[in-house]
Image (spheres, rainbow, N blue to C red):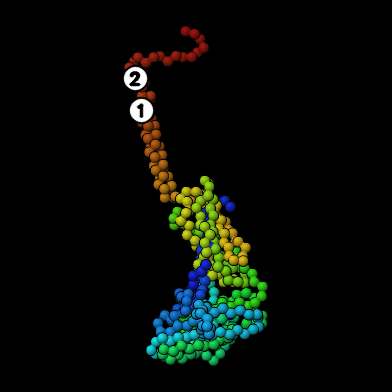
Amino acid sequence: MPVLHTPALPAGRRPLTALLTAALLLGAAVGTAAATPATAAATAAHADEPGWTAEPAAGSAGPARPYFYLSGPAGTVLEDRLALTNSSDRERTVTLRGADAYNTADGALAVRPAEPPAAQGRGGTGRGAGSWISFGTATTVRIPPRTRAVVPFTVTLPPASPPGDHPAAVIAAEDGREAGVRVHLRVAGPTLAALTVEDVSVRGEGARAVVAYTLVNRGNVALVPELALRAEGLFGEVPGRTARALPMELLPGQRVSLTEPWPGAPVLDDVDLTLTVTAPGAAPATASTSAWFVPWGIAARTGAGLLGLGGVALAALLLVRRRRTRGGGPADEEPVPGGKRAPEHELTGASR
């Protein structure tokens, strides 16, 4: 399952929390292994083993394209061409297919693996935009040495396909190695840019503190979010994070769990934290949390010292009391010689 990565354009009660982090804009190709997500390039896709590449075919006079961009109303058929270049000294046999693109749980961009033939015969599970891509009879292409082959393909938009972005990719594979080229596909119609921030929390303390949060794209277009972090402590504003673009593309309907480093987190404070995420065309999304920051190591050592001092004081007090008890009377009382004890007075009520 190749992973397509490309660079992209960031007051409650009080523990500090929350802020953002990241995801991925894809541009064009991806080198990868077949069964699991793999990293990819932002330009023309290269196989893991040098020798062949896959990329959008350039127009008659146009520049090279990093990815495909196709748009049209539901029910239409769109066309484009894939260029396969064999720069090696041996013939290459490359198989081609379409695939759905999606965000992994941590925001990376990936594509669905190929389905087995049996699943394809039953209609399979690939009902996304990847299943709209067809190479016709050219699903297997033989490329002679030092040769460039241009393969046409079509994208058929179903009549009932909803408007908005439908992320997909074209995948070329040979001997278990794959290269993918991103397909930015949009069905014409009303678009909605909307996102929310959820599950904000703070982990760690001091320079190691991070803000964890969940970002959800609730619209029908891909978003490149920005995030900012503001914190207020007992003694005023605490250094947060200024607005910055997240290195990710959040696809429609996708949910990702991210973390944002917070090196300005205090060591000792009670803080209200507010995370704000924006994206072009979308209303700002905010979420708040609070957190106590206590240097537990110092507090534990201080507490142990105070406890030890209290124990010493208590032991000294008990020792003094024990000595007084064993001595009988007060220490400064003089003993009375035997036979000369003063007679006890008898209280009878009569004077003597």
Is 90 or 206 nearer to us in this picture?
90
Whether residue 37 appears in this view of the structure is no
Q: Which residue is mark 1?
A: 327
Residue type (three-letter) at the residue carrying disc 1: Gly
Q: Residue furthest front?
A: 61
Q: How busy is the neighbourhood of tag 1: few (under 14 within 10 Å), some, or many (20 plus)?
A: few
Q: Residue furthest top?
A: 352
Q: Position of residue 331 (x, y in %)?
A: 36, 24
The structure residue drawn at horizontal position 58% and vertical position 85%, both measured from the top left corner, is 79
Q: Is residue 174 above or below residue 299?
A: below
Q: Position of residue 113 (x, y in %)?
A: 51, 80
Per the image, label 2 sits on a secondary structure element best described as loop
Left or right: 73 in relation to 270: right
Whether residue 285 appears in this view of the structure is yes
The structure residue drawn at horizontal position 46% and vertical position 75%, both measured from the top left corner, is 41
Q: Is residue 272 above or below residue 82?
A: above
Q: Which residue is mark 2?
A: 335
Q: How busy is the neighbourhood of tag 2: few (under 14 within 10 Å), some, or many (20 plus)?
A: few
Q: Position of residue 285 (x, y in %)?
A: 60, 61
Residue type (three-letter) at the residue carrying disc 2: Pro
Is 248 or 112 nearer to us in this picture?
248
